[in-house]
Amino acid sequence: MSEILLRTGHLSFAYPERSSSLFRRPVMRDVVKRVDLAVPRGSVLGLVGESGSGKTTLGRLLVRLLRPTSGGIQFDGIEIGRLGEAELRPLRARIQMIFQDPQSSLNPRLRLGVTLTRPLQVYGRLKGRQDQRNRAAALLDLVGLPKGFVDRYPHELSGGQRQRAGIARALALEPDFIVADEIVSGLDVSTQAHILLLLRELRARLGLTMVFISHDLSVVRVLCDDVAILQHGEVVEYGPVARIFNSPQHPYTRQLLSAIPLPDVEPGWLDDANPIVPSHQQGSAA
Amino acid sequence: MTAVLAVHDLHVAIGPRGSAANVLRGASLEVQAGEVRGLVGESGAGKSMLGRAVLGLLPANAVIGGGTIQFEGRDLLAMPEPERRSLLGRRIALIPQDPMTSLNPVRRVGAQISIVLRHHLALSKRDALERAAELLAEVAIREPRRVLELYPHEISGGMRQRVLIAMAFACDPSLVIADEPTTALDVTVQRQVLQLVERLRQRHGAAILFVTHDLGVVAKICRTMTVLHAGRVLEEGETADVLAKPRHPYTRALLAATPRADRPAEALRPVPPALIESLWSEAHRLDRLAMAGPA
């Protein structure tokens, strides 16, 4: 349990801002700033932050959809921060991502059987038609969907079922490491609870290591061992779930926790104890 | 107390005749003057449809199969269309769900707020802009005069939602339908927005029907609540009572399915599928009875 599967060292990412002049060098805008994380094998790390905190960018760096501006990412002892696409390819099978919106991340024109086994096909691990059907059925079964869904199209599924399909596809290559980006945000409470329990069960059964990105601390508490709180691209607090929830140290963590509306009546919660600060007024669309 | 809004036995179906889906099956609720009532349910429960029925904004293929919607004692469904339209935006207002798509992207914020004021209150262009600036200040927007000149894409999501709140309260309505107004927002921004809604409600003396799926939000802002499932009201009462001692098994199940940041997660339980199924089959049994007509 204590072996570190994924480690980042001073991981940073910046992108050029639109420059005012064609000939001036563009100003770089830091989105992820010197992030140090260590994810032990078999554990789940929650990445929490508000929109614009850089959590999605950090997730994309971890699966190397983005290349870090500086700093490193070690995956199973291998430095992957600077690797090129060819060198990354064998590793990509071991690192998978579940996307936020299953509506747009499943190809609407492909049956689930094809979509779910596409990763296997890409890595040449399918042995013919029958094998494809069997593997797809096994994946559907793994995430609690009926095997008959191999012939269904995404539009024939509910939101919760689609998200299960997204999870199944991420599991197809039996990865060591999964980044899940806001995968329960758009779901109803009961669907959300089903998906969270499914992930908890899969992680116990398959020994998954995960980074779970969310803006919702209550959801993080259900699933994660550790939490990293992100603000303006920096990790402001990082530690075991129990510690962060029971005695948050950083003011921003406290602010996030106190802003969660718990289903208890609490007179005074709406009073201007913390006066309304129009904080990111100038901020453009997130 | 008098009811600002009284919905009685409302039936709404959507879709082509013959294969229409019943989205409301005899739903009833009341909102008293100055009250904030939560209307809670999962997607497909019919909660947004109920709000839209009150506003007269049902989709074109929706059919009202029966029931009444009384606003300040007058039946909205029996009212001539021009009269009903004169109420909307003035006496009955909406805070929409999606701050990203609910503002016109090609018109300045000031123009969008002042059109409401000019139409309903017959203010001059200059007076309307003046009033719009006051309204923006009320929703804690700094430099309101500058913001009036901006386009929606130039302001943040939380700020857009505040503009929509300002518009909703612009004509001192007696009823505001808030349709999931904070679902798209971060928790800290959500709290600010809820605080604002409560402050404006007190100042303008409006009642609010607060449509949401979030029991936490209901607990914080609604004094009373109504639980909707499959187009029917399953439970209603004072929020404190319903959350502390839910009577209907579905309400209990919803609470058990809500993750809580203040507790370890062992207790999390999804709504049992058997319960959902029994609620739906009960709903369909009632539909068949209704179709058979009074015996």
Image (tube, coloured by chain):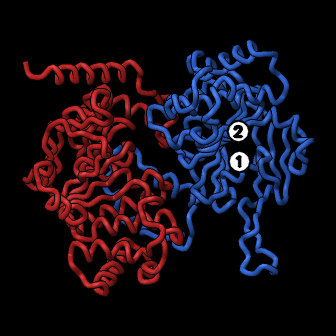
Chain colours: A blue, B red
Task: Determine if marks 1 and 2 fall on one subunit.
Answer: yes
Q: Is residue B134 among what the camera can see?
A: yes
Task: Tell whether B37 sits left or right of A174.
Answer: left
Task: Tell whether B98 sits left or right of B226.
Answer: right
Crowding around mark 2 (Cα neighbors within 10 Å: few <14, some 14 to 19, many 20+) is many
Q: Is residue A1 among what the camera can see?
A: no
Tag shown at residue B277: none
**Amino acid type at mark 2:** Met
Tag shown at residue A97: 2
Name which residue lies at 30% across and 84% down. B125
* Closer to the eye: label 1 or 2: 2
* Separation of residues labelled 1 and 2 (CA atoms): 9 Å
Q: Which chain carries label 1?
A: A
**Amino acid type at mark 1:** Gly
Image quarter (top left, top right, bottom left or bottom right) of the C terminus of chain A: bottom right
Residue A3's x, y, as percent? 82, 34
Residue A180's x, y, as percent? 65, 40
Q: Foreground: A33 or A96?
A: A96
Task: Please tell me how many numbered marks the rendered image carries.
Answer: 2
Label pair 1/2, CB-CB below 8 angstroms: yes
Residue matched to label 1: A59
Quarter-of-image position of residue B119: bottom left
Name which residue lies at 78% across and 52% down. A66
Crowding around mark 1 (Cα neighbors within 10 Å: few <14, some 14 to 19, many 20+) is many
Q: Which chain carries label 2?
A: A
